[in-house]
C-alpha cells in the first residue's frame, strides 16, 4: 500500500488558507482550504472526510490538487456552457427598458421580441438583469387601505441605484 501524500505548509500558506477558510468568496474555496488545513494537521483522509461530511475521494482530490497546483487549486475551474443567447446590444436595450419603467420579465421578453430579438426563455432575461444588479420585486398592496385594488400577479425589476 503506497504511503499517504503528506501536506506540509509553511506559515505564510497556513495563514492564507485560514483567511480563505474564513473569508473566501465561494463556499467551495472555503471548504477546500479547510480540508487542506486539516490534512496539514496530520488527520487522515478518512478522518477529514468524516469531520467535513465529505466523500473520501473528494478529500483525496483536494489534496492532489493542492500538491500539484498549490493555492490555484482552491478556486473552481472555468465551466463550459452554451454562450448567452442575448448579445451585448440586446442586453443593454433590456437594461434601458427596465430602468425607464417597472416591467415584469414577461413584459421585457415581449418588448424584446417586438423589437426583432430572438425568442428566449424568460429566465434568460432574468439572469441578464440580475447580472446587471437589478432586483426582482413583487407588487404588493397595503392591507390598511379601505379599498384594495385587485392583486397584481406581476413582478417588476427594480434598479437599486
Image (spheres, rainbow, N blue to C red):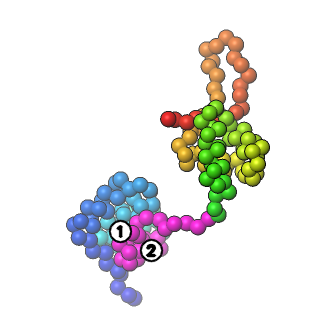
Q: Which of 69/112 is in front? A: 112
Few, some or many residues within 10 Å of mark 1 (<14, 14–19, 20+): some
Q: Which of 47/77 is in front? A: 77
Q: CA distance from mark 2 to mark 1?
A: 14 Å
Q: Could you tell me which secondary element the residue under label 2 belongs to?
A: helix
136, above or below 67, in the image:
above
**Residue occupying image coordinates x 73% and y 41%:** 111
**Residue 44 has which mark?**
none
Question: Which residue position holds label 2?
Answer: 61
Quarter of the view holding residue 46: bottom left
Asked if residue 126 lies left or right of residue 12, the reply is right
Q: Is residue 69 magenta?
A: yes
Q: How many marks?
A: 2
Residue 34: horizontal and vertical position, in percent? 36, 62
Residue 56: horizontal and vertical position, in percent? 45, 72
Q: Is residue 131 visible?
A: yes
Q: Could you tell me which secondary element the residue under label 1 belongs to?
A: helix
Q: Is residue 33 magenta?
A: no
Quarter of the view holding residue 82: bottom right
**Residue 71 has which mark?**
1
The span picked out in magenta is 57-81
44, above or below 84, in the image:
below
Residue 48: horizontal and vertical position, in percent? 38, 67
Magenta span dominant secondary structure: helix
Asked if residue 13 lies left or right of residue 25, the reply is left
Q: Quadrant of the N terminus?
A: bottom left
**Sequence-earlier tag: 2 or 1:** 2
Q: Which of 144/95 is in front? A: 95
Amino acid at each position: 500500500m503506497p504511503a499517504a501524500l503528506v501536506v506540509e505548509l509553511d506559515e505564510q500558506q497556513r495563514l492564507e488558507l485560514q483567511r480563505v477558510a474564513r473569508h473566501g468568496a465561494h463556499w467551495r474555496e472555503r471548504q477546500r482550504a479547510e480540508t487542506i488545513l486539516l490534512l496539514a494537521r496530520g488527520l487522515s483522509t478518512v478522518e477529514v472526510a468524516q469531520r467535513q461530511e465529505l466523500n473520501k475521494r473528494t478529500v483525496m482530490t483536494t489534496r492532489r490538487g493542492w500538491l500539484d497546483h498549490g493555492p490555484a487549486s482552491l478556486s473552481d475551474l472555468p465551466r463550459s456552457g452554451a454562450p448567452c443567447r442575448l448579445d451585448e446590444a440586446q442586453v443593454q436595450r433590456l437594461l434601458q427598458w427596465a430602468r425607464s419603467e417597472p416591467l415584469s420579465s414577461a413584459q421585457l421578453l415581449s418588448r424584446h421580441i417586438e423589437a426583432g430579438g430572438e425568442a428566449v426563455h424568460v429566465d434568460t432575461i432574468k439572469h441578464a438583469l440580475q447580472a446587471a444588479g437589478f432586483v426582482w420585486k413583487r407588487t404588493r398592496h397595503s392591507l390598511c387601505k379601505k379599498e384594495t385594488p385587485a392583486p397584481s400577479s406581476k413582478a417588476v425589476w427594480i434598479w437599486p441605484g
